[in-house]
Amino acid sequence: MRGQAMIETVLAVLVVSFAFLALFRLSHMLTGKILVEHAAMRVARARSVGFNDFMCKKSARIAVMPVAGKRLWPEGWSFDDPRELSRVPIYMRSADGAVARGVLEYDGWNRLSVEPGDGTDVRTSLGFSIFGDSVQYRLEGRAGIEDNHSLYLTGP
């Protein structure tokens, strides 16, 4: 039969390509899960040293930067531009949301929710799209720092 090998090859390449793309997407989601957990820990630490809600949210945003999607501001820089990392300290020092958006902004940051609480039970979640915008998935992270100050410090 002529052409049978070509048809089998095309089918095999399609199956292998689909499996590769599925594994690639799964690894991206696992990276997102690890970073959302890391963001929760960063928020718990920020809360434990006395930072306000806005500072906690900024530290969570910086923690999920690798999976935050397209950079909205500044535009025109390449993906690996070193100037991007130099903006992180400036972003962290920004006083309000308008100034922060003028320094650094990512598409995925508006899908990030942060519930800092008192630092003992922090919850973060990030909206994640699997196939374009048709399937949405939320990656959730939890962290907390125990409040043991009463064991070591005496109050008035």
Image: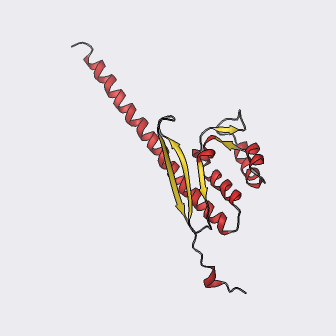
Check the image and tell me how it is coloured: secondary structure
Determine the residue located farthest toward the top in the rendered image.
Answer: 2
Q: Is residue 139 left or right of residue 148?
A: left
Q: Residue at x 63, y 46 (%)?
A: 109
Determine the residue located farthest toward the left in the rendered image.
Answer: 1
Q: Quadrant of the C terminus?
A: bottom right
Q: Is residue 84 left or right of residue 68?
A: right
Pinpoint residue 56: horizontal percent, then vertical percent. Answer: 67, 59
Along the viewing direction, whichever of 156 and 85 lies nearer the viewer = 156
Give the quarter of the image for residue 146. bottom right
Count of labels in the image? 0
Give the quarter of the image for residue 20. top left
Q: Residue at x 60, y 75 (%)?
A: 147
Along the viewing direction, whichever of 126 and 63 lies nearer the viewer = 126
Q: Residue at x 68, y 38 (%)?
A: 72
Pinpoint residue 152: horizontal percent, then vertical percent. Answer: 63, 84
Give above or below for 41 relative to 155. above
Q: Is residue 17 left or right of residue 58?
A: left
Q: Residue at x 65, y 69 (%)?
A: 48
Q: Quadrant of the N terminus?
A: top left
Pinpoint residue 102: horizontal percent, then vertical percent. Answer: 76, 43
Pinpoint residue 141: horizontal percent, then vertical percent. Answer: 52, 57
